[in-house]
């Protein structure tokens, strides 16, 4: 498909949908905030991963060459995302008597495995904060030289007040400095800062701090916000197209990134700021203290006390895609069960489509499905509208199967291509029940076919007892048989 499609993308900076245009023709640079690897991947990780995977897949399908950078935070992310406290990874390492990098590696691997399960494509580059300390130190130097930072007892802090005299701190989140001042508590140990709203670019390590690196100012570690500024511009250039992440990162993380980039480079680095909304569970915010914190492994296995059953990775992916990425998404057993049924209906439609025979004339036009799906995706990634259009066509596919509608060979191939493009290539779903997705040999299909052929033979011989026995036995193990004039169809329920 050509890149003529006009794509509208909501830009948090301007608070409106804007026509998407790239800095370099045909190429997209996209940076997305990845996980802090000190615990198991959870429900909150699934939404940004699937959202930006959708955007990545869509832009590629539109013919763009995309460099997608998603970082791994394995250093400097302090408890409660504050400037004081203990590094989350170092704390976990201390509790479990491990090397911090052992902790980071273990949970990075767990995250990758969960992403594979969700059919999330790997990004083009996945830089680690710990591997880019030199770049972060260099970026801090640039901000110091520009006059927007100061040293205090071996730590470097960003001078928000000095920055705000020339630029606008708060333009992404819509907060002004008075509001921020009112809502910032003075914490113990913040006396190093000139103002409570100043944030760390480099922290001097206390004697017991395990993760530390030499710098011109002290042995220490970078501030949390610094890694994204340094790594995004290293791999995508001083200006790039899209910066993504969860809405919870808008303030302070992304606001601080904009301030750092503008102070160090003279301009913001990202043109479009794209944020996915939050996940709630039964209407409540997800949190360990609330007891509703569900890891992806618990979801896939059904082991959390709040879950009535296990939910497959594709059910979770489909559930995320059923809501627009900018709306809140409420998880409940009822909603997940509905998603499971919806996904099953869609996959059965795809399977039915593969068995349809062409006819001499077309009574429906598959271009209508392509037009609806294309318009929905171009309108700020409206995946619910894509799914709605596909469901309408599942109904038509069933009519084609029953002979109520017909398609010529050419139109049938067009329909198959459109369904493949949107269901598998763009939405990134896969048929979990197919042998290919299980990575093993399909032994079920030939066995079921053999049994049903034997049943056909029994029916021809008017051996109704054998015919019924085969059908009932298959029903018991979850295989539904549908008799047709010229044979049979079957599906796994």
Image (cartoon, rainbow, N blue to C red):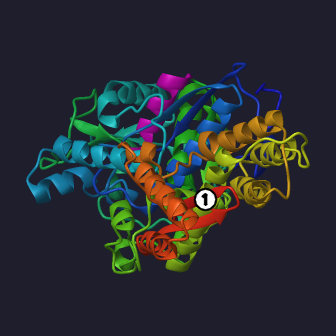
Q: Nearer the viewer, residue 348 or 335?
A: 348
- Residue 371's place in the image compared with 474, above or below, is above
Residue at 57 percent of width and 53 percent of height: 250
Going by the picture, which residue comes out furthest to the front?
461
Residue at 74 percent of width and 44 percent of height: 357
> Quarter of the image containing the N terminus?
top right
Q: Nearer the viewer, residue 327 or 195?
A: 327
Displayed quadrant of residue 3? top right
Going by the picture, which residue comes out furthest to the top?
25
Identify residue for label 1. 488
- Residue 328's place in the image compared with 127, above or below, is below
Local packing at callout 1 (Cα closer than 10 Å; few below 14, some 14-19, many 20+) is few
Q: Which residues are magenta?
A: 223-237
Residue 395 located left or right of residue 105: right
Residue at 33 percent of width and 61 percent of height: 297
**Does residue 414 appear anywhere in the picture?**
yes
Residue 201 x/y as whole percent: 40, 40
- Residue 443's place in the image compared with 315, above or below, is above
Find out whether residue 141 is within the magenta segment: no
Going by the picture, which residue comes out furthest to the left?
97
Residue 145 located left or right of residue 381: left
Residue at 51 percent of width and 26 percent of height: 233
Main secondary-structure element of the magenta-colored stretch:
helix
Displayed quadrant of residue 80? bottom left
Q: Nearer the viewer, residue 293 or 142?
A: 293
Residue 196 located left or right of residue 243: left
Q: Tell me the element at label 1.
A: strand
């Amino acid at each position: 498909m050509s890149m003529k499609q006009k794509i509208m993308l909501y830009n948090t900076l301007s608070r409106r949908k804007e026509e998407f245009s790239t800095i370099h023709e045909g190429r997209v640079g996209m940076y997305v905030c990845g996980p802090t690897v000190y615990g198991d991947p959870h429900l909150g990780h699934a939404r940004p991963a699937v959202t930006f995977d959708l955007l990545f897949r869509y832009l590629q399908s539109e013919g763009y060459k995309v460099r997608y950078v998603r970082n791994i935070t394995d250093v400097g992310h302090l408890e409660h995302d504050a400037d004081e406290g203990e590094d989350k990874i170092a704390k976990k390492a201390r509790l479990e008597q491990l090397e911090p990098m052992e902790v980071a590696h273990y949970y990075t691997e767990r995250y990758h495995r969960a992403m594979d399960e969700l059919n999330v494509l790997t990004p083009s580059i996945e830089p680690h904060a710990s591997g880019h300390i030199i770049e972060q130190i260099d970026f801090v130097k640039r901000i110091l030289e520009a006059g927007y930072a100061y040293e205090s007892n071996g730590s470097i802090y960003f001078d928000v007040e000095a920055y705000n005299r020339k630029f606008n701190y708060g333009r992404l989140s819509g907060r002004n400095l008075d509001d921020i001042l009112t809502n910032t508590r003075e914490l113990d140990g913040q006396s190093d800062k000139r103002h409570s709203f100043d944030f760390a670019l480099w922290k001097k390590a206390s004697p017991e701090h395990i993760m530390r690196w030499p710098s011109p100012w002290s042995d220490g570690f970078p501030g949390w916000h610094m890694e994204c500024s340094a790594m995004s511009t290293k791999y995508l250039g001083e200006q790039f197209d899209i910066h993504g992440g969860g809405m919870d990162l808008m303030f302070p993380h992304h606001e601080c990134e904009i301030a750092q980039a503008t102070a160090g480079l003279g301009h913001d680095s990202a043109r479009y700021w794209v944020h996915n909304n939050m996940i709630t569970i039964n209407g409540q915010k997800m949190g360990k203290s609330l007891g509703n914190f569900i890891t992806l492994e618990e979801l896939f296995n059904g082991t959390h006390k709040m879950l009535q059953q296990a939910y497959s990775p594709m059910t979770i992916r489909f559930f995320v895609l059923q809501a627009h990425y900018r709306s809140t998404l409420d998880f409940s057993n009822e909603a997940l069960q509905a998603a499971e049924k919806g996904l099953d209906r869609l996959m059965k439609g795809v399977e039915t489509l593969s068995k349809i025979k062409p006819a001499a004339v077309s009574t429906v036009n598959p271009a209508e499905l392509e037009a609806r799906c294309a318009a929905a995706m171009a309108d700020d990634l409206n995946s619910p509208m894509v799914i709605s259009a596909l469901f309408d066509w599942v109904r038509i596919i069933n009519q084609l199967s029953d002979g109520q509608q017909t398609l010529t060979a050419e139109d049938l191939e067009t329909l198959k291509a459109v369904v493949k493009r949107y269901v598998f290539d763009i939405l990134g779903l896969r048929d979990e029940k197919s042998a290919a997705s299980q990575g093993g040999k399909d032994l079920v299909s030939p066995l079921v076919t053999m049994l049903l052929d034997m049943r056909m033979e029994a029916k021809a011989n008017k051996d109704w007892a054998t015919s019924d026995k085969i059908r009932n036995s298959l029903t018991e193990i979850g295989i539904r048989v549908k008799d047709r004039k010229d044979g049979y169809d079957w599906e796994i329920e």
